[in-house]
Amino acid sequence: MYQVYALKYAERDMTACQFFYREASHAPLTLHYYVWLILGGPHPILVDTGFLDDEARARGIRNYVSPAAMVERAGIKPGDVPIALITHLHYDHWAGHSLFPRAEYWIQRDEVAFWTGPFGRYEAFRQSANPDALAQLVTLNYANRVRIIEGDREVLPGLCVHRVGGHTAGLQIVTVETGRGTVVLASDASHFYRNVETRQPVQIMTSLPEMLAAFETIHTLAGAERLIVAGHDPEVA
């Protein structure tokens, strides 16, 4: 059985209206940033790569610790991570790819197509991206370090990715068989537990119907509601 570790590497002060669809409240909330380390298989698996310190400074993000340092604190050298499952290509999930120099990155075809296509350049989407990191996606692909996948895929026995879209064009969530049951790493299909519990989407999305359908997929895949893990909720830690 696998073990899943949430590695928190930064925090950011935000407001409720940014993360709950048509929410008028400007009540403060704190966004926690995580990468996820999966152990118990033949080798460690990373979910997302975080971002670098320059991104933290530019976006006013506090208490930043390099995701590579967090992985090392968990007993794994960053260079010993052979696979990183990239849930989507927003800055906080992809811009730290250089921290894991031997990883192969698994990304959905729809996600790659969107961010290399005509719409990512618009401010509505661009504000969530790191253009330099996205440009490096092409170089990494030519170096055979990107695995472009379509739909649901088994990574290892008991460890799968599932394309749900919604928040981004090719967002994928991760299911992990553990001693407690099937854990769902929801990533930004549900930033906070409130999103999935009340079926209330975030404001940033490419498809509202897909985002709503993703909530149902998360509940279907999880072994129990307590095994759903939100993407940015402080309660995770």
Image (cartoon, rainbow, N blue to C red):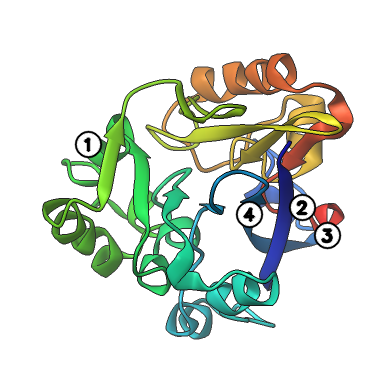
Quarter holding the C terminus? bottom right
192 up-or-down from 79: above or below: above
Q: Name the residue under label 1.
A: 113
137 up-or-down from 190: above or below: below
Badge 2: residue crowd in 10 Å (few <14, some 14–19, many ≥20): some
Task: Find the distance from the CA under tag 2 to the CA under tag 1.
Answer: 29 Å
Q: Mark 4 points at which residue?
A: 36
Q: Identify which amino acid the numbered label 3 is placed on.
A: Ala
Task: Find the distance from the CA under tag 2 to the CA under tag 4.
Answer: 13 Å
Q: Can residue 184 be seen in this view?
A: yes
Q: Identify which amino acid the numbered label 1 is placed on.
A: Ala
Residue 150, image x, y percentages: 33, 24
Picture residue at 63% right of the left edge, 54% below the top: 36
Q: Name the residue under label 2.
A: 233
Q: Between disc 2 and disc 1, whose residue precedes?
A: 1
Badge 3: residue crowd in 10 Å (few <14, some 14–19, many ≥20): few
- Secondary element at tag 4: strand
| Residues marked 2 and 4 touching at CB (< 8 Å) | no
- Secondary element at tag 1: helix
The foreground one among 192 and 156 is: 156
Q: Is residue 14 visible?
A: no
Task: Find the distance from the CA under tag 3 to the CA under tag 1.
Answer: 33 Å
Q: Between disc 1 and disc 4, whose residue precedes?
A: 4
Task: Find the distance from the CA under tag 3 to the CA under tag 2.
Answer: 8 Å
Residue 105, image x, y percentages: 35, 50
Question: Which mark is in front, 2 or 4?
Answer: 4
Question: Which mark is in front, 1 or 4?
Answer: 4
Q: Mark 3 points at which residue?
A: 237
